Image (cartoon, rainbow, N blue to C red):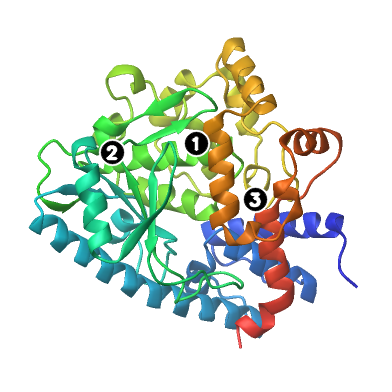
Amino acid sequence: MQPSLKTLRTGLRVATETLAQELARPGNAMPAWNSLQWQLASAAAAAHGISPLLQRLSLWPDPDWNGFLASQRAHVEHRHRRVAALLEHIDEAAQATNVAAVALKGAALHSLGLYMPGDRPMADIDLLVDDADAEKVGDLLRSIGYVESFAQWKHRVFKPAAGHPTPGLGEHRDTPINIELHTRIQERLPVSCVDITERILPVDRRPGLNPYPSNGALMSHLLLHAAGNLCSRSLRLIHLNDIALLARRMTMRDWQVLWGEGAAGVPWWALPPLQLICRYYRDPFPKAVLARLRADCPTLLRLLFRRQNLTAASCSNLWLPALPGIEWSRSLQEAAAYLRNRLRPTEESRRERADMVRTQLWLQDQSWVTLPHGRRLLTRLTRPVPRMDTLYVVRAALDGYARTGA
């Protein structure tokens, strides 16, 4: 008999909160879970990208659980070698064609030594380039066997000309490595854009792959990325761990980079991710930084996220929210614009949805995603609707958890 959605929802919450505590502060007693709860724990660990880290940090002696974690670590370590080789190839090609790029997020965290090979999954490679070099870098990617899959307001996505996604639970060594090409570092929160590109692109960049200008610039990007994911209820625990690890390397001068110049100067969006991290990690940030960010953050947003947990902020919450991110609106006018876009999506939004349905494995053969927009919105407003991405991972865990660790 298949478990009910209510049972799955409760089990995902229990798994997510327990694993978050164990990752942040390893050494807790192994929970006395039944087989279903262990399966849901594997779904949560896979969805949040933390299976390899748990294999190294947690000492729970359940054999099936350890088999699953060890298998995931082996896949991630193999994939890490593929990613590293591809980054080296891109670096050489960029130097040869005299273009500069910044290798973003996961690649930067690995280069700083914050993670060992095999610790952190990388779904794709993110590159930031100057607007003037975008087409040249696109040609470079095509020359090494990539084709453009789709484009949206944040980036262009390139995928290998050969290769297909591998269905199953968690990471797989043979999953194609996509490349996301950015010319701006920005997030919609929820309608207006916050753009921090100028603090991410190095002034003295050279041909090839470049690091971030400073740890503060990297932290700015990680926090803005986390804010965007909080706004869409798609945060992952690995994002919080990234920030917590980098914070240990930060000086007060590094933190000062958050308060940049221009329109993006006041980081009103940075406090909610830090508040969530403080729920799990022990004293990760200087009190002076938190105090200054509290003064910058809108009152409603600050109060809402003071009580928020990871489950509610992520795909571990099985139900789709009807109006995700409206609490990030900073004025009545912005909230009204958000509601207008929800009621009548722009042509850009429609194209993005069509691209997702076409390219995302977890949306394949799902009747819900092809319903007319009005029916989907009415359904979400009148009854709980499960998230397709979460159900995909849960089904994979129910079908293959024990076999994955074999």
Residues at circles 2 and 3 in contact by the CB criterion of under 8 Å:
no
In this picture, residue 367 sits left or right of residue 184:
right
- Please tell me which of labels 3 and 1 falls first in the chain: 1
Disc sitting over residue 227 in the figure: 1
Q: Residue furthest right?
A: 1
* Res. 125 image quadrant: bottom left
Quadrant where the image shows the C terminus? bottom right
Marks 2 and 3 sit apart, C-alpha to C-alpha, by 27 Å
Q: Residues within 10 Å of mark 3 (few under 14, many from 20)?
A: many
Residues at circles 3 and 1 in contact by the CB criterion of under 8 Å:
no
Disc sitting over residue 394 in the figure: none
Q: Secondary structure at mark 1?
A: helix
Q: Secondary structure at mark 2?
A: helix
Residue 62 position (above or below residue 361): below
- Please tell me which of labels 2 and 1 falls first in the chain: 2
Residue 166 position (above or below residue 183): below
Q: Residue at x 52, y 80 (%)?
A: 70
The answer to whether residue 62 of the structure is visible from this angle is: no
Q: Residue at x 32, y 35 (%)?
A: 184
Circle 2 residue:
217
Identity of the amino acid at label 3?
Cys
Residue 81 position (above or below residue 94): below
Q: Residue at x 85, y 59 (%)?
A: 7
Q: At which x and y percent is residue 38?
A: 72, 72
Circle 3 residue:
315
